[in-house]
Protein backbone atom coordinates (compact mmCIF):
# COMPACT_ATOMS: atom_id res chain seq x y z
CA UNK A 1 0.00 0.00 0.00
CA UNK A 2 1.44 3.37 -1.05
CA UNK A 3 2.79 5.50 1.78
CA UNK A 4 2.73 9.26 2.31
CA UNK A 5 5.79 11.04 3.71
CA UNK A 6 5.51 14.73 4.64
CA UNK A 7 8.52 17.05 4.74
CA UNK A 8 7.90 20.16 6.85
CA UNK A 9 10.50 22.81 6.17
CA UNK A 10 11.13 21.21 2.78
CA UNK A 11 12.91 24.34 1.56
CA UNK A 12 16.00 23.05 3.36
CA UNK A 13 17.36 22.08 -0.03
CA UNK A 14 20.31 19.87 0.86
CA UNK A 15 18.54 17.90 3.57
CA UNK A 16 15.29 17.36 1.68
CA UNK A 17 16.94 16.36 -1.56
CA UNK A 18 19.18 13.80 0.16
CA UNK A 19 16.47 12.36 2.38
CA UNK A 20 14.09 11.87 -0.52
CA UNK A 21 16.81 10.32 -2.67
CA UNK A 22 17.41 7.82 0.16
CA UNK A 23 13.70 7.18 0.65
CA UNK A 24 13.05 6.36 -3.00
CA UNK A 25 15.96 3.93 -3.06
CA UNK A 26 13.82 1.52 -1.00
CA UNK A 27 11.30 -0.47 -3.12
CA UNK A 28 8.60 0.13 -0.49
CA UNK A 29 8.58 3.86 -1.31
CA UNK A 30 9.01 3.91 -5.08
CA UNK A 31 5.31 4.79 -5.40
CA UNK A 32 5.07 6.99 -2.29
CA UNK A 33 3.33 10.33 -2.08
CA UNK A 34 5.92 12.92 -1.14
CA UNK A 35 4.32 16.00 0.41
CA UNK A 36 6.59 19.04 0.49
CA UNK A 37 5.59 21.94 2.74
CA UNK A 38 7.38 25.21 3.44
CA UNK A 39 6.37 28.79 4.30
CA UNK A 40 8.81 30.19 1.69
CA UNK A 41 7.11 29.84 -1.67
CA UNK A 42 10.25 30.43 -3.72
CA UNK A 43 12.23 27.76 -1.93
CA UNK A 44 9.25 25.41 -2.04
CA UNK A 45 8.95 25.80 -5.81
CA UNK A 46 12.67 25.14 -6.22
CA UNK A 47 12.79 22.01 -4.06
CA UNK A 48 9.69 20.63 -5.77
CA UNK A 49 11.42 20.83 -9.14
CA UNK A 50 14.49 19.17 -7.65
CA UNK A 51 12.52 16.31 -6.10
CA UNK A 52 10.59 15.75 -9.31
CA UNK A 53 13.93 15.55 -11.12
CA UNK A 54 15.05 12.78 -8.74
CA UNK A 55 11.77 10.93 -9.27
CA UNK A 56 12.11 11.19 -13.06
CA UNK A 57 15.77 10.15 -13.04
CA UNK A 58 14.97 7.02 -11.05
CA UNK A 59 11.83 6.28 -13.08
CA UNK A 60 9.94 6.03 -9.80
CA UNK A 61 6.16 6.06 -9.58
CA UNK A 62 6.20 8.48 -6.65
CA UNK A 63 3.85 11.45 -6.66
CA UNK A 64 5.18 14.84 -5.54
CA UNK A 65 2.86 17.46 -4.09
CA UNK A 66 3.87 20.91 -2.86
CA UNK A 67 1.86 23.06 -0.50
CA UNK A 68 2.06 26.05 1.81
CA UNK A 69 -0.70 24.43 3.89
CA UNK A 70 0.63 22.24 6.71
CA UNK A 71 -2.67 20.42 7.11
CA UNK A 72 -2.64 19.34 3.47
CA UNK A 73 0.88 17.99 3.82
CA UNK A 74 0.20 16.12 7.06
CA UNK A 75 -3.27 14.71 6.45
CA UNK A 76 -3.04 10.88 6.57
CA UNK A 77 0.77 10.94 6.41
CA UNK A 78 2.63 7.78 7.44
CA UNK A 79 5.88 9.57 8.13
CA UNK A 80 6.85 13.17 8.91
CA UNK A 81 10.27 14.87 8.78
CA UNK A 82 10.94 18.37 10.14
CA UNK A 83 13.90 20.46 8.97
CA UNK A 84 12.69 23.94 9.89
CA UNK A 85 14.59 27.12 10.75
CA UNK A 86 12.79 29.72 12.86
CA UNK A 87 13.72 33.04 11.28
CA UNK A 88 16.16 34.04 8.58
CA UNK A 89 19.83 34.78 9.21
CA UNK A 90 18.94 38.42 9.92
CA UNK A 91 17.06 37.15 12.98
CA UNK A 92 19.23 34.40 14.40
CA UNK A 93 22.56 36.16 13.82
CA UNK A 94 21.90 37.89 17.16
CA UNK A 95 22.18 34.49 18.87
CA UNK A 96 25.88 34.86 18.12
CA UNK A 97 26.44 38.63 17.97
CA UNK A 98 24.95 39.56 21.35
CA UNK A 99 26.89 36.98 23.43
CA UNK A 100 30.10 38.02 21.63
CA UNK A 101 29.46 41.62 22.72
CA UNK A 102 29.63 40.40 26.32
CA UNK A 103 32.59 38.06 25.80
CA UNK A 104 31.01 34.69 24.94
CA UNK A 105 32.72 33.59 21.72
CA UNK A 106 30.45 31.29 19.70
CA UNK A 107 31.20 29.02 16.75
CA UNK A 108 27.77 27.64 15.72
CA UNK A 109 25.35 28.38 18.55
CA UNK A 110 22.59 25.99 17.54
CA UNK A 111 22.64 23.62 20.51
CA UNK A 112 23.78 24.96 23.91
CA UNK A 113 24.80 28.07 25.76
CA UNK A 114 22.92 31.37 25.48
CA UNK A 115 22.84 31.05 21.67
CA UNK A 116 21.37 27.55 21.72
CA UNK A 117 18.87 28.34 24.46
CA UNK A 118 17.46 31.38 22.66
CA UNK A 119 17.38 29.46 19.39
CA UNK A 120 15.32 26.86 21.23
CA UNK A 121 12.99 29.44 22.77
CA UNK A 122 12.27 30.87 19.31
CA UNK A 123 11.84 27.45 17.68
CA UNK A 124 9.80 25.64 20.32
CA UNK A 125 6.48 27.29 19.44
CA UNK A 126 6.64 26.43 15.71
CA UNK A 127 7.75 22.88 16.54
CA UNK A 128 4.89 22.43 19.03
CA UNK A 129 2.44 23.77 16.44
CA UNK A 130 3.72 21.14 14.01
CA UNK A 131 3.50 18.41 16.65
CA UNK A 132 -0.08 19.46 17.46
CA UNK A 133 -1.01 19.16 13.78
CA UNK A 134 0.67 15.76 13.53
CA UNK A 135 -1.32 14.67 16.55
CA UNK A 136 -4.50 15.95 14.88
CA UNK A 137 -4.07 14.91 11.23
CA UNK A 138 -1.77 11.85 11.34
CA UNK A 139 -1.44 10.67 14.96
CA UNK A 140 -0.07 7.26 13.94
CA UNK A 141 2.73 8.72 11.81
CA UNK A 142 6.41 8.22 12.61
CA UNK A 143 7.81 11.69 13.29
CA UNK A 144 11.55 12.31 12.76
CA UNK A 145 13.07 15.67 13.69
CA UNK A 146 16.31 17.08 12.26
CA UNK A 147 15.90 20.63 13.63
CA UNK A 148 18.32 21.95 16.26
CA UNK A 149 18.64 22.39 19.16
CA UNK A 150 17.80 18.70 18.95
CA UNK A 151 17.66 17.64 22.58
CA UNK A 152 15.45 20.45 23.90
CA UNK A 153 13.02 20.32 20.96
CA UNK A 154 12.63 16.54 21.15
CA UNK A 155 12.28 16.73 24.92
CA UNK A 156 9.38 19.20 24.84
CA UNK A 157 7.53 17.40 22.02
CA UNK A 158 7.87 14.04 23.76
CA UNK A 159 6.49 15.52 26.98
CA UNK A 160 3.55 17.35 25.38
CA UNK A 161 2.65 14.52 22.95
CA UNK A 162 3.83 11.28 24.60
CA UNK A 163 1.76 9.05 22.31
CA UNK A 164 3.49 10.21 19.14
CA UNK A 165 6.11 7.85 17.73
CA UNK A 166 8.97 10.31 17.48
CA UNK A 167 12.71 10.73 17.77
CA UNK A 168 15.38 13.21 16.73
CA UNK A 169 18.21 12.41 14.33
CA UNK A 170 21.74 13.76 13.98
CA UNK A 171 24.37 12.57 11.51
CA UNK A 172 27.28 13.24 13.85
CA UNK A 173 27.23 9.68 15.21
CA UNK A 174 27.70 7.84 11.93
CA UNK A 175 29.85 10.65 10.54
CA UNK A 176 32.35 10.50 13.41
CA UNK A 177 32.37 6.69 13.37
CA UNK A 178 33.35 6.84 9.71
CA UNK A 179 36.12 9.33 10.53
CA UNK A 180 37.55 7.13 13.28
CA UNK A 181 37.45 4.09 10.99
CA UNK A 182 39.35 6.06 8.35
CA UNK A 183 41.98 7.08 10.88
CA UNK A 184 42.79 3.44 11.65
CA UNK A 185 42.36 2.11 8.11
CA UNK A 186 39.23 0.01 8.63
CA UNK A 187 36.21 -0.07 6.27
CA UNK A 188 33.02 1.50 7.64
CA UNK A 189 31.00 -1.68 7.19
CA UNK A 190 33.34 -3.66 9.47
CA UNK A 191 32.93 -1.48 12.56
CA UNK A 192 30.35 -1.56 15.32
CA UNK A 193 29.96 0.53 18.44
CA UNK A 194 27.82 1.53 21.39
CA UNK A 195 27.33 5.29 21.47
CA UNK A 196 25.40 7.14 24.17
CA UNK A 197 25.06 10.45 25.99
CA UNK A 198 23.15 13.52 24.84
CA UNK A 199 22.95 15.11 21.41
CA UNK A 200 26.33 16.50 20.29
CA UNK A 201 27.81 15.15 23.53
CA UNK A 202 27.43 11.43 22.97
CA UNK A 203 30.46 9.18 23.35
CA UNK A 204 31.56 5.86 21.84
CA UNK A 205 31.54 3.59 24.89
CA UNK A 206 33.10 0.89 22.73
CA UNK A 207 34.42 0.84 19.17
CA UNK A 208 34.87 -2.58 17.59
CA UNK A 209 36.28 -4.07 14.40
CA UNK A 210 34.72 -7.47 13.77
CA UNK A 211 34.07 -7.70 17.51
CA UNK A 212 37.58 -6.64 18.61
CA UNK A 213 38.24 -3.47 20.62
CA UNK A 214 40.14 -0.99 18.42
CA UNK A 215 40.24 1.94 20.83
CA UNK A 216 43.99 1.23 21.32
CA UNK A 217 44.48 1.86 17.58
CA UNK A 218 42.53 5.13 17.79
CA UNK A 219 44.59 6.17 20.80
CA UNK A 220 47.83 5.42 19.00
CA UNK A 221 46.72 7.36 15.91
CA UNK A 222 45.79 10.46 17.94
CA UNK A 223 48.98 10.43 20.02
CA UNK A 224 51.47 9.57 17.27
CA UNK A 225 50.10 11.02 14.04
CA UNK A 226 50.30 14.83 14.01
CA UNK A 227 47.98 15.09 11.00
CA UNK A 228 45.25 13.12 12.76
CA UNK A 229 45.68 15.14 15.96
CA UNK A 230 45.42 18.37 14.01
CA UNK A 231 42.26 17.29 12.17
CA UNK A 232 40.15 17.48 15.35
CA UNK A 233 42.20 19.29 17.98
CA UNK A 234 39.38 19.99 20.46
CA UNK A 235 37.87 16.54 20.24
CA UNK A 236 41.25 14.86 20.44
CA UNK A 237 42.11 16.86 23.55
CA UNK A 238 38.77 15.83 25.06
CA UNK A 239 39.53 12.19 24.23
CA UNK A 240 42.97 12.39 25.83
CA UNK A 241 41.41 13.81 29.01
CA UNK A 242 38.20 11.75 29.19
CA UNK A 243 39.18 8.46 27.58
CA UNK A 244 36.22 8.26 25.18
CA UNK A 245 35.57 9.90 21.83
CA UNK A 246 32.75 12.44 21.43
CA UNK A 247 30.49 12.59 18.40
CA UNK A 248 30.15 16.22 17.30
CA UNK A 249 32.80 18.37 15.62
CA UNK A 250 35.52 20.28 17.42
CA UNK A 251 33.83 23.59 16.65
CA UNK A 252 30.58 22.58 18.29
CA UNK A 253 32.20 20.93 21.29
CA UNK A 254 34.48 23.88 21.95
CA UNK A 255 31.30 25.82 22.86
CA UNK A 256 29.89 23.27 25.28
CA UNK A 257 32.74 23.21 27.79
CA UNK A 258 34.87 25.76 29.61
CA UNK A 259 38.27 24.57 28.38
CA UNK A 260 38.80 26.01 24.89
CA UNK A 261 37.08 29.37 24.26
CA UNK A 262 37.38 31.41 27.45
CA UNK A 263 40.53 33.31 26.37
CA UNK A 264 41.80 34.54 23.00
CA UNK A 265 45.04 32.55 23.37
CA UNK A 266 43.08 29.32 23.92
CA UNK A 267 40.89 30.01 20.90
CA UNK A 268 44.04 30.58 18.86
CA UNK A 269 45.63 27.36 20.12
CA UNK A 270 42.68 24.99 19.92
CA UNK A 271 40.01 26.46 17.64
CA UNK A 272 41.84 28.13 14.77
CA UNK A 273 44.31 25.75 13.14
CA UNK A 274 42.49 22.44 12.98
CA UNK A 275 42.11 20.85 9.55
CA UNK A 276 38.67 19.31 10.09
CA UNK A 277 35.55 20.81 8.50
CA UNK A 278 34.83 23.00 11.54
CA UNK A 279 37.75 23.56 13.94
CA UNK A 280 35.94 26.34 15.81
CA UNK A 281 36.34 29.79 14.29
CA UNK A 282 34.07 32.51 15.69
CA UNK A 283 30.68 32.74 13.93
CA UNK A 284 31.58 29.99 11.45
CA UNK A 285 27.97 29.06 10.73
CA UNK A 286 26.86 32.70 10.53
CA UNK A 287 29.43 33.40 7.86
CA UNK A 288 28.35 30.26 5.98
CA UNK A 289 24.67 31.27 5.96
CA UNK A 290 25.38 34.87 5.04
CA UNK A 291 27.31 33.62 2.05
CA UNK A 292 24.64 31.14 1.00
CA UNK A 293 21.92 33.76 1.28
CA UNK A 294 23.30 35.22 -1.92
CA UNK A 295 24.58 32.03 -3.58
CA UNK A 296 21.96 29.33 -2.93
CA UNK A 297 20.13 29.96 -6.20
CA UNK A 298 23.36 29.64 -8.19
CA UNK A 299 24.29 26.45 -6.30
CA UNK A 300 20.90 24.95 -7.13
CA UNK A 301 21.20 25.97 -10.76
CA UNK A 302 24.56 24.19 -10.87
CA UNK A 303 22.98 21.08 -9.33
CA UNK A 304 20.36 21.01 -12.08
CA UNK A 305 23.18 20.92 -14.64
CA UNK A 306 24.83 17.84 -13.11
CA UNK A 307 23.71 14.19 -13.42
CA UNK A 308 21.35 13.05 -10.65
CA UNK A 309 22.96 10.80 -8.05
CA UNK A 310 20.55 8.08 -6.90
CA UNK A 311 22.82 6.19 -4.49
CA UNK A 312 21.73 5.92 -0.88
CA UNK A 313 23.42 8.21 1.64
CA UNK A 314 24.11 7.79 5.36
CA UNK A 315 21.18 9.60 6.98
CA UNK A 316 18.94 7.45 9.17
CA UNK A 317 15.44 8.59 8.19
CA UNK A 318 14.73 6.41 5.16
CA UNK A 319 16.04 3.24 6.84
CA UNK A 320 13.84 3.94 9.87
CA UNK A 321 10.74 4.36 7.72
CA UNK A 322 11.62 1.20 5.82
CA UNK A 323 12.01 -0.80 9.04
CA UNK A 324 8.66 0.33 10.43
CA UNK A 325 6.38 0.28 7.38
CA UNK A 326 8.54 -0.82 4.44
CA UNK A 327 10.07 -4.27 4.14
CA UNK A 328 10.57 -4.38 7.95
CA UNK A 329 14.34 -4.87 7.85
CA UNK A 330 15.26 -3.99 11.43
CA UNK A 331 17.50 -0.95 11.75
CA UNK A 332 19.58 0.15 14.73
CA UNK A 333 20.52 3.80 15.01
CA UNK A 334 21.19 6.51 17.58
CA UNK A 335 18.11 8.58 18.34
CA UNK A 336 17.03 11.28 20.77
CA UNK A 337 14.43 10.09 23.28
CA UNK A 338 13.43 10.78 26.87
CA UNK A 339 15.53 9.08 29.52
CA UNK A 340 13.29 6.36 30.90
CA UNK A 341 16.07 4.65 32.88
CA UNK A 342 18.10 4.29 29.70
CA UNK A 343 21.21 6.05 31.07
CA UNK A 344 21.26 5.50 34.82
CA UNK A 345 23.35 8.52 35.84
CA UNK A 346 21.56 11.17 33.77
CA UNK A 347 18.35 12.90 34.94
CA UNK A 348 15.19 10.85 34.54
CA UNK A 349 13.05 12.27 31.75
CA UNK A 350 15.75 14.39 30.12
CA UNK A 351 16.52 13.89 26.43
CA UNK A 352 19.30 11.39 25.77
CA UNK A 353 20.89 10.06 22.59
CA UNK A 354 21.04 6.27 22.76
CA UNK A 355 20.81 3.24 20.48
CA UNK A 356 17.26 2.74 19.19
CA UNK A 357 15.86 -0.22 17.27
CA UNK A 358 13.37 0.48 14.46
CA UNK A 359 11.17 -2.43 13.40
CA UNK A 360 7.53 -3.22 12.62
CA UNK A 361 7.00 -2.70 16.37
CA UNK A 362 7.96 0.96 16.05
CA UNK A 363 10.87 2.54 17.93
CA UNK A 364 12.41 0.81 20.95
CA UNK A 365 15.18 2.59 22.86
CA UNK A 366 17.91 0.36 24.28
CA UNK A 367 19.08 0.51 27.91
CA UNK A 368 22.72 1.61 28.20
CA UNK A 369 23.32 1.72 31.95
CA UNK A 370 25.53 4.32 33.63
CA UNK A 371 27.99 6.37 31.64
CA UNK A 372 31.57 6.44 32.94
CA UNK A 373 31.64 8.97 35.78
CA UNK A 374 33.51 11.69 33.89
CA UNK A 375 31.08 11.45 30.97
CA UNK A 376 28.08 11.32 33.27
CA UNK A 377 29.19 14.51 34.99
CA UNK A 378 29.80 16.36 31.73
CA UNK A 379 26.50 15.29 30.15
CA UNK A 380 24.51 15.79 33.35
CA UNK A 381 25.42 19.49 33.51
CA UNK A 382 24.17 20.06 29.97
CA UNK A 383 21.08 17.88 30.46
CA UNK A 384 20.03 19.72 33.62
CA UNK A 385 20.50 23.09 31.91
CA UNK A 386 18.31 21.84 29.06
CA UNK A 387 15.67 20.70 31.54
CA UNK A 388 15.54 24.22 32.99
CA UNK A 389 15.23 25.78 29.53
CA UNK A 390 12.43 23.39 28.58
CA UNK A 391 10.51 24.22 31.75
CA UNK A 392 11.04 27.92 31.08
CA UNK A 393 9.63 27.55 27.56
CA UNK A 394 6.48 25.91 28.89
CA UNK A 395 5.93 28.30 31.79
CA UNK A 396 7.24 31.62 30.46
CA UNK A 397 9.60 31.87 33.44
CA UNK A 398 12.45 34.26 32.56
CA UNK A 399 14.26 33.52 35.82
CA UNK A 400 14.72 29.90 34.74
CA UNK A 401 16.28 31.07 31.47
CA UNK A 402 18.70 33.25 33.41
CA UNK A 403 19.57 30.46 35.84
CA UNK A 404 20.09 27.98 33.02
CA UNK A 405 22.52 30.31 31.26
CA UNK A 406 24.31 30.99 34.56
CA UNK A 407 25.37 27.34 34.68
CA UNK A 408 26.46 27.08 31.05
CA UNK A 409 30.15 26.09 31.33
CA UNK A 410 31.56 28.55 28.80
CA UNK A 411 29.36 31.47 29.87
CA UNK A 412 30.14 30.99 33.55
CA UNK A 413 33.87 30.84 32.72
CA UNK A 414 33.90 34.32 31.17
CA UNK A 415 31.01 36.35 32.64
CA UNK A 416 29.83 37.48 36.06
CA UNK A 417 26.24 36.93 37.15
CA UNK A 418 25.37 40.58 36.45
CA UNK A 419 26.93 40.38 33.00
CA UNK A 420 24.93 37.23 32.26
CA UNK A 421 21.75 39.00 33.34
CA UNK A 422 22.49 42.00 31.11
CA UNK A 423 23.23 39.74 28.14
CA UNK A 424 20.04 37.75 28.69
CA UNK A 425 17.92 40.91 28.97
CA UNK A 426 19.33 42.20 25.70
CA UNK A 427 18.58 38.92 23.98
CA UNK A 428 15.00 38.92 25.29
CA UNK A 429 14.56 42.44 23.95
CA UNK A 430 16.02 41.50 20.56
CA UNK A 431 13.83 38.42 20.16
CA UNK A 432 10.65 39.70 21.82
CA UNK A 433 8.41 39.15 18.74
CA UNK A 434 9.49 35.48 18.68
CA UNK A 435 8.87 34.80 22.37
CA UNK A 436 5.16 35.27 23.06
CA UNK A 437 5.20 32.87 26.01
CA UNK A 438 7.34 35.37 27.96
CA UNK A 439 5.31 38.52 27.37
CA UNK A 440 3.38 38.24 30.62
Image (cartoon, grey):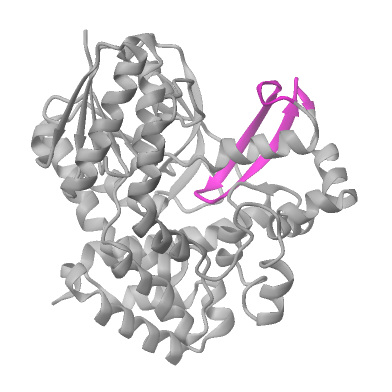
**Part of the protein shown in magenta:** 187-212
Observer-nearest of 350 and 14? 14
Q: In which quarter of the image is residue 279?
A: bottom right
Q: In the displayed orientation, state which residue is furthest to the bottom.
A: 418
Main SS, magenta residues? strand
Q: In the displayed orientation, state which residue is furthest to the right.
A: 224
Give the x, y percent position of residue 440: 13, 77
Give the x, y percent position of residue 144: 34, 35
Q: Which residue is drawn at 62% across and 72% down?
A: 258
Would you place residue 192 above or below residue 434 in this image? above
| Total numbered badges shown on the rendered structure | 0
Q: Is residue 139 left or right of residue 431?
A: left
Q: Which residue is drawn at 54% across and 79% down?
A: 412
Q: Can residue 154 be seen in this view?
A: no
Q: Is residue 35 visible?
A: yes
Q: Is residue 142 left or right of residue 291?
A: left
Would you place residue 50 above or below residue 39 in this image? above
Q: Is residue 251 left or right of residue 364?
A: right
Asked if the stretch drawn in magenta spans residue 210, the answer is yes
Asked if the stretch drawn in magenta spans residue 193, the answer is yes
Q: Which residue is drawn at 90% across and 49% down?
A: 224
Q: Residue at x 63, y 34 (%)?
A: 194
Give the x, y percent position of residue 357: 47, 24
Q: Quadrant of residue 289?
A: bottom left
Would you place residue 279 above or below residue 431 in this image? above
The quadrant of the picture occupied by the N terminus is: top left
Observer-nearest of 88 and 290? 290
Give the x, y percent position of residue 323: 40, 17
Amino acid sequence: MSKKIAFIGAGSFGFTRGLIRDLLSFPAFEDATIALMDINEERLTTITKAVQRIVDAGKYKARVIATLDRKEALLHADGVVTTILAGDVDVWQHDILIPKKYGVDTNVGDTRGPSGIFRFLRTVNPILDIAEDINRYCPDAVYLNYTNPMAMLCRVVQEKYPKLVTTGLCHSVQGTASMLARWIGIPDDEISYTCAGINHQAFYLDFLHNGKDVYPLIDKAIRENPEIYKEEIVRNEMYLALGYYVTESSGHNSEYVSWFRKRPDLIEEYCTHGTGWNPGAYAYILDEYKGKKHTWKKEIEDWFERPVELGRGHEYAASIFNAIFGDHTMFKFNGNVRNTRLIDNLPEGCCVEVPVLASRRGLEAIHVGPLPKQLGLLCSISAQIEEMAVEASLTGNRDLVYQAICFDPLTSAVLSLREIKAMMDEMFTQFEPWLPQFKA
